[in-house]
Amino acid sequence: MNAILQAIQADITTLDVDAIVNAANSSLLGGGGVDGSIHRAAGEELTRECMGLDGCETGQAKITQGYRLKARHVIHTVGPVWHGGTHGEPELLRSCYANSLRIAAEHNLTSIAFPCISTGIYHFPPDQAAQIAVETVRAFLATPSSLQQIIFCCFAEADRLRYEQLLQKS
């Protein structure tokens, strides 16, 4: 694994990377939280492109252009709503990360930034979500791909510290 993994505290819409990941809802047409922020920053062209994608299932991912963002692409993924962990939520969250990484690699992207998927209004426990995110990224990077930089972009300091702690473990 030669890729750089890092945790930062920032507004994901400001990052200059090949792709930012949008924690989207299944319509892909914008919503609250990071989803709404990305749609507002990218502009109405993003919403227009998303209208043609016919939504997205939980755990899956789709790619669009970045439009007015510094990021050249947006990879939209729909995280699971937490229902106690007995309805496949961990596996679905793992799929969000794996499918986003797969799409990035298929498009020969070198840098990608993830938000904390499903930990906001979907109430996924942040410690478990971060563990799944880091494990899934590390597993993906065990095979060669174009990806050279993976950023866990955290809105809150507590989330950044959580990811930093996980990244320090080998």
Image (cartoon, rainbow, N blue to C red):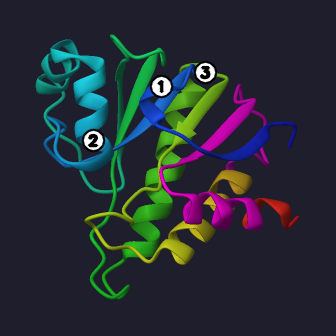
Residue 157 image offset from top left, x and y in percent? 57, 59
Q: Amino acid at mark 1?
A: Thr
User: What type is the residue that disc 2 sits on?
Assistant: Asp
Across and down, in percent, residue 60 comes to 35, 48
Q: Badge 2: few (under 14), some or many (20 or more) residues near its Cα, within 10 Å?
A: some
Residue at 67% across / 63% down in the picture? 161
The three-letter amino acid code for the residue at tag 3 is Leu
Q: Which mark is residue 4?
A: none
Q: Residue at x 48, y 41 (%)?
A: 100
Query: Which residue is the site of mark 2?
Result: 35
The span shown in magenta is 140-165
In terms of secondary structure, where does tag 2 sit?
A: helix
Q: Name the secondary structure under disc 3.
A: loop
Q: How busy is the neighbourhood of tag 3: few (under 14 within 10 Å), some, or many (20 plus)?
A: many
Q: Is residue 41 shown above or below 21?
A: above
Question: Residue 136 at x, y = what percent?
Answer: 63, 58
Seen at 27% across and 49% down, the residue is 33
Q: Is residue 145 magenta?
A: yes
> Does 37 appear above or below 65?
below
Estimate the spatial distance between the alpha carbons at disc 3 and disc 1, rounded to whole Å.
18 Å
Residue 78 falls left or right of residue 98? left
- Which residue is label 3 attached to? 109
Disc 1 or 2, which lies upstream in sequence? 1
Q: In the image, what residue occupies the spot 23% across and 26% down?
A: 40
The percent coordinates of residue 159 (x first, y second) are: 56, 62
